[in-house]
Amino acid sequence: MEFLYEYGLFIAKAITIVIALLLAVGGILSLASRQKMGKGHLEISSLSDKLEEVANYSREMMLSKEQLKRFHKEQKKVAKSQKKQTTANENNTGQLFVIDFKGSMDAHEVDFLREEITAILTVANEKDEVLVRLESGGGVVHGYGLAASQLQRLRDKKISLTIAVDKVAASGGYMMACVADKVLAAKFAIIGSIGVIAQLPNFNKLLKKSNIEFEQHTAGEFKRTLTMFGENNEQGREKFRAELEEVHQLFKGFVQEHRPGLDINKVATGEYWYGSQALELGLVDQIQTSDDFLLQANAERKIFTVKYTQKKNIAERFGLAASTAVESLFMKLWSMQQRLTR
């Protein structure tokens, strides 16, 4: 039994060290790749045209020649009689712009989001609408705070903003979602987690056991509260917890400002809920997938996707792969922790 205990302890230490190394390597490569980032470009395409192509292909495959001929004949009559009316409706309903945001832990995608928002603001007016298909389990406060501020730019210009959550918008993801005029969610989408978490391993005992000294010098009583390699004390822990609580209060205030009808103390416990539960709590406004929303909107207005892209070299791809692997590991651990606490 003692052997198994020692072996388990060794495995735990090894996993912790590997995670720390991956974080360090991923961070360095990510920083290096950002310093070498070149100019990207904006891609705008008609989603309405793509949906029409899908519909045409489906009809060609499923209808007989006679049925297809009859359909085209009927469509020509309808198009001719409703041409003026359609033009008038398009002018009244405006256009729909679609943005995809799949956020990582460091929220670096906000660099592209700001370009997409800026592009839309140069052409959109109050008749138009923006749909953001959002997917994120959250991450750093400052990154997601900036992402939410980018979405607020649309609200400030009186442009209707709808957020669609098909999978997850938790923590920082929900910080973004609550800015919208309307929040849609799939029935089993993960919503909420209005809380703050910070965790880090401490190797001080391991260093002492290996007779390795660690020195850290600071100016300012709370320049450093907790450290990975030094010996932490209760004063530092209390300050660290106080800082977390302060961020949590700011988070709660932000959500309450944008969704004043919420019972903020009930939903800001750090828990998450599935779409149907989130609807009952007032975290979302409607149970609907982004696909259904777009199909309905396509009958009334033109839809365009707006995407800012940038080519990556080999080093950048490697850095992204490393950071994605670390993020995936932490998301799995987070999911396990949530299941255990529910």
Image: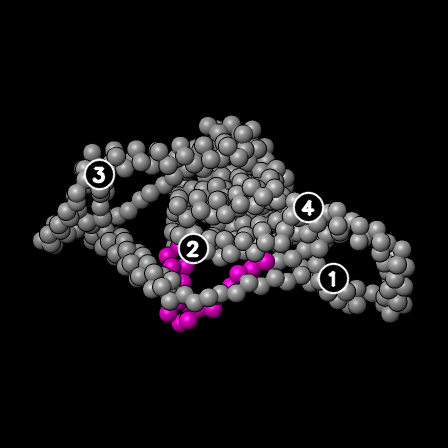
**What main secondary structure does the magenta stretch of the protein show?**
helix
Which class describes the residues within 10 Å of circle 4: few (<14), some (14-19), or many (20+)? some
| Sequence-first tag of 1 and 3 | 1
Which residue lies under the disc numbered 2? 108
Which labelled disc corresponds to residue 52? 1
Which class describes the residues within 10 Å of circle 2: few (<14), some (14-19), or many (20+)? some
| Sequence-first tag of 4 and 3 | 4
Q: Amino acid type of disc 2?
A: His
Which residue lies under the disc numbered 4? 127
Residue 3 drawn at (x, y percent): 20, 53
Mark 4: secondary structure: loop
Q: Amino acid type of disc 1?
A: Glu
Mark 3: secondary structure: loop
- Quadrant where the C terminus sits is top left
Residue 313 drawn at (x, y percent): 42, 71
Q: From mark 4 to mark 3, how far is it between C-alphas? A: 50 Å
Which one is closest to the eye, mark 4 or mark 3?
A: 4
Q: Amino acid type of disc 4?
A: Lys
Q: Amino acid type of disc 3?
A: Phe
Mark 1: secondary structure: helix
Q: State left or right for residue 139 relative to residue 155.
A: left
Q: From mark 3 to mark 2, how far is it between C-alphas? A: 28 Å
**Residue 166 visible here:** no
Q: Are marks 3 and 2 in contact (CB under 8 Å)?
A: no
| Sequence-first tag of 1 and 4 | 1
Residue 111 drawn at (x, y percent): 46, 56
Residue 111 on the magenta segment: no
Q: State left or right for residue 333 relative to residue 264.
A: left
Which residue lies under the disc numbered 3? 222
